[in-house]
Image (cartoon, helix red, strand yellow):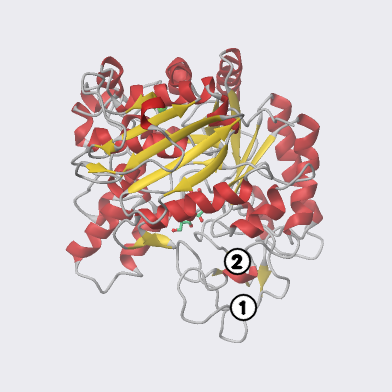
Amino acid sequence: MQDWYKNMSFYQIWIRSFADGNDDGIGDLLGVYDKLTYIKSLGVDGIWFCPIYPSPNADFGYDISDYKNIHPDYGTLSDFKRVLNRAHELGLKVIMDLVINHTSDEHPWFIESRKGGEDNPYKDYYIWRDGKGVKLPNNWESFFEGKAWEWCEERGQYYLHIFAKKQPDLNMDNPAVREEIKSIMRFWLDMGVDGFREDVITYISKHEQLPDGIPFLPAINGLPFYKDGPNLLRYLREFRAVAGEYGAVQIGEAPMTPVKTALQYLRGEDRVLDMMIQFDTMMADCFFTEYVHHPFSLRKLKRAFSRWQYALDGVAWNALYLENHDHPRVIDRYGSLEFWRESGTMLAACYLFQQGTPFIYQGQELGMTNIALPSIDHYLDVASVNAYHSFFRWEPVEKRLRRIHRSSRDSARTPVQWSGEENAGFSTAEPWFYVNPNYREINAAAEDRDPNSILNFYRKCLKLRKDCPTLLWGSYREYRWHSGWLYLYERQWQGERILVSCSFSKRQRRFSLPEGYAAEQAELLLDNYPAEQPGQVGTLRPYEVQVLRWK
Ligand code: TEU
Ligand code: CA
């Protein structure tokens, strides 16, 4: 069975910084509408919208106060329908972000729940507990803001928040809450959306007793008691039934879920998720989070790629990505600013030709890079601000700022650089967030004109993928896994073999082809160096990638 999403690729929109259509400095649906033909021109087949619902923006949309509406900053429901219809006319699918582990504390459910009272229908919508004497209900830490419990004076109890204080966790064990989720799903599916990206979906089922976690461990000490929890499969099956009625795709975000566990959700006809956003490939220069970094390790990256490729081949389907709104830009991390164009294009090819459905994050196709802001007051991401003031508070200011510059999610949230005009062509008004000053060199208009640009390379890659069944369906095999500079993998399908050779080195290097590959018979399908500078099989220039075919 070939499911509709398998030969596709998706473009991810974080709307606030995408394109401003009404010139108030904030990206919006009108802006998206105007850019639909640009998105189509990339050769992608769908769009994933990060949350566009009403939200106080404590976590930029991931704190939702109304699941069945559009944030006034971004437009109205009818603006959304226009975008949806036009996207469909252009042959683009549209998937929405479903954030159901938590809501905003300004959601009417929470405002009601806070009141308590025996016959209050919202009483058990969230996870409320008494303290233990002077102590909190347990020792869990949140990801974004200190302890995972916050006192509510009105109710005289604590509520659980695994993320920010303004993101109370829903009580998924309450059947009424699950009915609400299904109703939200139906609302968008009835309107015509094609599926969901499901935020931290593997955290929604908490261990009943909420036991204490490992003491002294920051941020993740409670993880064993809410990740891949006891009732998760059962709840996902309920949601699957709804999605199934509409033939909708479901992509689950699963931080730190190992591949073996992932297969429980992804395998077979009765799977509960179609794809999973794993975090392994985002950890090639850090431990668990970007804030605890180490120098980039190609071996670590390759191990992560291959682990998922081998384990899922033939039994499940991968979601492929190297960037999204939660991670700093990938050229700064895994590539080289010195070889900006070369590494930006090589990084594209290194993941787009693996087996799976690729996701491309806005600006990634332009090779956008991290921004360095002058002080912590310029940063807006709750996770960055918290890291600066808590985990790293003992470090000197300079060191902390360097850390934030390197690690902040804000680095990936600067306005998209459309042109070399004022405000990078994002808006005629002053943008809501800082534009990266490199927009005069790095922007869509300039790259559109340059046949060798990162933008045009993404287009070439996506076209090649589509034209080539081996790249879509072929099996995966890695060679030279021990190399510290070369990532070499093969795709094979019905007798045809394709080798993708990627250099992560700043100098020219040689390597020998795997046994059974004759250089003379190779057909060069793609190279990221200009055509006037033809490459040589077996030699790779700095950050060169070659895609070679044997028939
Ligand atoms: O991200 C989940 C998530 O686990 C990461 O943000 C993680 O906490 C971080 O990388 C640890 O360093 C999702 C969304 O993608 C993110 O934007 C939201 O902030 C988060 O959930 C809460 O909804
Ligand atoms: Ca606007």
Crowd around label 2: few <14 · some 14–19 · many ≥20 (10 Å): many
Q: Is residue 368 above or below residue 173?
A: above
Q: Give coordinates of residue 511: x percent, y percent.
A: 31, 44
Tell me if 218 is positioned left or right of 253 in this view: left
Tell which residue pokes out farthest to the top in this image: 89
Of the four image quadrants, the one with ligand 2 is top left
Tell me if 393 is positioned left or right of 73 in this view: left
Quadrant in the rendering for residue 391: bottom left
Q: Give coordinates of residue 506: x percent, y percent.
A: 21, 45
Tell me if 93 is positioned left or right of 368 in this view: right
Quadrant in the rendering for residue 94: top right
Q: Give coordinates of residue 191: x percent, y percent.
A: 69, 25
Q: In the image, what residue occupies the spot 53% across and 47% down?
A: 62
Q: In the image, what residue occupies the spot 20% across and 41% down?
A: 508
Q: Is residue 300 above or below residue 218?
A: above
User: At numbered mark 2, what does the secondary structure look like: helix, strand or loop?
Assistant: strand
Q: Which residue is mark 1?
A: 137
Asked if the residue at tag 1 contacts the one at tag 2, i.e. Cβ–Cβ closer than 8 Å, the answer is: yes
Q: Is mark 1 within 8 Å of ligand 1?
A: no
**Label 2 amino acid?**
Leu
**Label 1 amino acid?**
Pro
The answer to whether residue 153 shows anywhere in this view is no
Q: In the image, what residue occupies the spot 41% across and 26% down?
A: 521
- 3D distance between C-alphas at marks 2 and 1: 9 Å
Q: Earlier in the sequence, mark 2 or mark 1?
A: 1
Q: Which residue is mark 2?
A: 160
